[in-house]
Image (cartoon, rainbow, N blue to C red):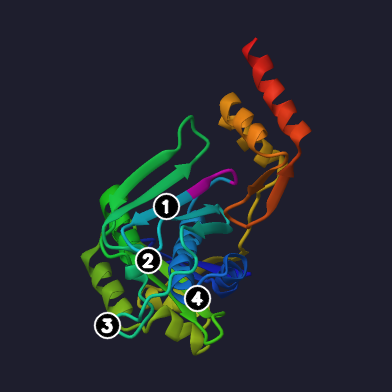
Amino acid sequence: MGKIIRALSADGSVFCAAINSRDIVNEIFRIHNTSPVASAALGRFATIASLMGCLMKSKSDRLTLRIKGDGLGGAMTAVADYLGNVKCYTGNNNVDLPLNAAGKLDVSGYVGKNGFLAVIKDLGLKEPYATQTPIVSGEIAEDIAYYYAVSEQIPTVCALGVLVDTDWSIKAAGGFLIQLIPPINDKVISIVEKNVDGMKSVTDMLSNGIEIEKIAIKGLEGLNAEILDTFTAQYHCDCSRERTMSMLISLGEKEIDDLIKKEEETEVCCHFCNKKYLFSYNEMREILYSLREEKI
């Protein structure tokens, strides 16, 4: 289980959400069999999706993040609910890149520095709210901070980290978001900047046994912050045979007919959890008949 902490300054001017996502990222590694750099990139992406998800209000709200750069990793997608439960996948799980100039996993090389980040919020309205901003570094944290500054006009500090162990499992993973709430106070900005500058990396702090609660409060040090709530999140895929059948129906009559002609049995694999759903020839024929009847 991942552990999420949400904290607020005494005057309500600064909010922080922080997560220890080690278990979530280890599950990503287990399901997707990711290389170290893919684990670092997809782990960061899932971590921030979880944090952004827990900022939504309603139980039915859903957040989808997509990032597509010119790196070797291809596109990444992450989906989170209002509790921070998350699922994700990447275009290339097995990319192997040399370490970057700082001697760390080259997430930017995996993602790329040219492309876009899409944020899609399904808030139960007729159409989801979708925004797209350019990638600024490919390190993900900076790209998220840029999104908030440009699309939501919210000054935001974002820090993310994934530390991969020698056996490729996840030794530490987590992150935090610090956001200023209008009206913006310049003095508060200075305090937050000083706090963040004085903090070690997220993975350094977690590896040294610093609890996620202390990390959240440290980001708001000097502002008399209090923890609002604490809850758990997990890697969770809500796919089902029924949802998969609905997806097949959405392909339309021609696509279904083509599948029937090609295969005696149709296999559909979920990108998020790799679970396979099999549909027999007769089941596919029933779907085709139902589509044709709708036209009559």
Q: CA distance from mark 4 to mark 2?
A: 17 Å
Check if residue 61 falls in the magenta segment. yes
- Tell me where the magenta segment starts and ends, as one range: 59-63
Q: Secondary structure at mark 1?
A: strand
Q: Which residue is mark 3?
A: 101
Q: Which residue is mark 1?
A: 66
Check if residue 37 falls in the magenta segment. no
- Tag 2: residue type? Ile
Q: From the viewer's perspective, is residue 42 above or below residue 272?
A: below
Q: CA distance from mark 4 to mark 1?
A: 20 Å
Looking at the rendering, which quadrant does residue 140 occupy?
bottom left
Mark toward the start of the polypeptide (3 vs 1): 1
Q: Which residue is mark 2?
A: 178
Mark toward the start of the polypeptide (3 vs 2): 3
Q: Position of residue 85 (x, y in %)?
A: 59, 58
Q: Which residue is mark 4?
A: 173
Mark toward the start of the polypeptide (3 vs 4): 3
Q: Residue furthest front?
A: 262
Q: Secondary structure at mark 4?
A: strand
Mark toward the start of the polypeptide (4 vs 1): 1
Q: CA distance from mark 3 to mark 1?
A: 27 Å
- Tag 3: residue type? Ala
Tell me the quadrant of the picture where the C terminus can be found.
Answer: top right
Q: Which is nearer the eye, 73 or 195?
A: 73
Other residues around mark 1 within 10 Å, as few (<14) / some (14–19) / many (≥20): many
Mark toward the start of the polypeptide (4 vs 2): 4
Instruction: Tell me what residue is drawn at x 57 percent, y 53 percent.
Output: 271
